[in-house]
Image (cartoon, helix red, strand yellow):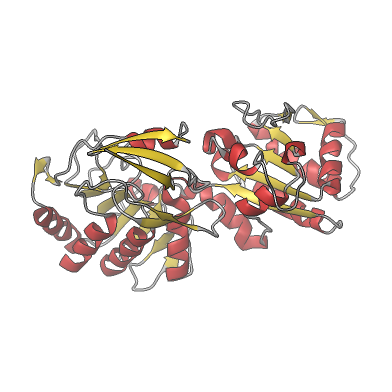
Amino acid sequence: MSEVTEVPSPFCGIGTDDLTIRVDGLSLKVIENGCSVNTPAFEQAITDTSPRVDGKAVSFDAAVAKAAALLKGTNQPVIGGCATDVNGMRALLALADRSGAVVDNMNFNAARRNFLALQDSGWMNTTLAEVKNRCDLLLVVGADPESFAPRFFERYLWNEEAMFLEDTGNREVIYLGKAPSGDASTSPKGKKAQVFECGMEDLPEVVAVLRALVKGQPIRAESVGGIAVADLQGIADKLKAAHYSAVTWAAGALAYSQAELTVQTLSEMIKDVNNMNTRCSGLPLGGKEGDQTANQVCGWTTGYPARTRFSKGFPEYDPYLNDIESMIANGEADALVWVQAFNVSAVPPGTNLPTIVIGRSGMTFSKEPDVFIPVGTPGIDHTGHAYRMDNVVAIRLKKCRDSGLPSTFDVLNAIEQAL
């Protein structure tokens, strides 16, 4: 039995890096600084170590050979999930290039709302370190940071020391659209966040009015989405009076048609505030299950995010046509490779296509895939790198135990070499 300290997490978007884990053979126990996201993810038991073909245990080489045989005769394979570390994603893209596959990250429909706004008009975003050291006002729009990363406020708002703030306990938090799920946003001094609730369907109009008020435009209505315009005016005034405000949202929570326009309105509002002799920045929430890592690696490799086609010998990006779930439903794919090294519950979509799953040990399926190869989890079973939500820091993941499981890189590289 041993203990590993200062363990970074690949499971939460903020890249928590202060966990202490007790290792007893293959069993892990988070004994310090755990949370509702990280603790169960680290403590997930290993239940199977042998690859399977048609539900029967086989050798690693036999599973690789079968996977390669399934891919060799395909016209349009698709690779989904993309939940792995930097090296795993490199190998995934190499396999996609070799096999002419379409690559699609499992969280891309949410990320697309951010990418469309970014590609159309750009944005001004910040980092977690800047929030920790400078932010005096946090506006949370339609999101719940506590469910995304339970220790977000503890680590980046209520930290005891900040480089450019004398008292972090004086920071102000405002929720717009959705109430917090807990008390983490309450300051150490007992000051609670202000909450202005509205229905998710009303959020586009509420955000549009808030931006108009920031710009000093007249609003004739007295309320919008159930929120008094006077209250929205108060938020606008606080944004303009703050020394360094941050606006955060979660694209995945904006589950309505054309939500990218809400992201764009927020991004343009942030630019407006920066034209008023103060600082304001965006802070999109994301980074769970390797989605930031997938888009980063695909971005520097191809120039595009992870919804890219390689069937013509060069990368083609399309945020709509390269949706592999739609492709499978429309009969446009003839084989599925699913990569998920973090979450045993994130299984591939149901399909009758030949299916290869490279996944975390413990996955269970309603229909057994043609090939299942259990892999080690980055940050537990092998070292690696993963990007946190602000995209500027690649977290160096530790190896906590010797499970004997191969990495995603090992498996995908072996299949590519076998083609």
Q: Position of residue 325 (x, y in %)?
A: 37, 47
| Residue 254 visible from this viewpoint | no
Q: Residue at x 39, y 48 (%)?
A: 326
Out of 77 and 363, give the one closest to the viewer.
Answer: 363
> Relative to 259, is 338 on the left or the right?
left
Q: Position of residue 47 (x, y in %)?
A: 20, 35
Q: Position of residue 374 (x, y in %)?
A: 22, 46
How many numbered circles are shown?
0
When the figure is inspected, residue 255 is found, relative to residue 334, above or below; the finding is above
Q: Quadrant of the C terminus?
A: bottom left
Q: Residue at x 40, y 69 (%)?
A: 315
| Residue 199 visible from this viewpoint | yes
Q: Residue at x 69, y 31 (%)?
A: 188
Q: Position of residue 13 (x, y in %)?
A: 50, 46
Q: Residue at x 53, y 38 (%)?
A: 149
Give the quadrant of residue 64.
Answer: bottom left
Give the quadrant of residue 25.
Answer: top left
Q: Quadrant of the N terminus?
A: top left
> Relative to 299, is 373 on the left or the right?
left
Out of 383 and 233, give the one closest to the viewer.
Answer: 383
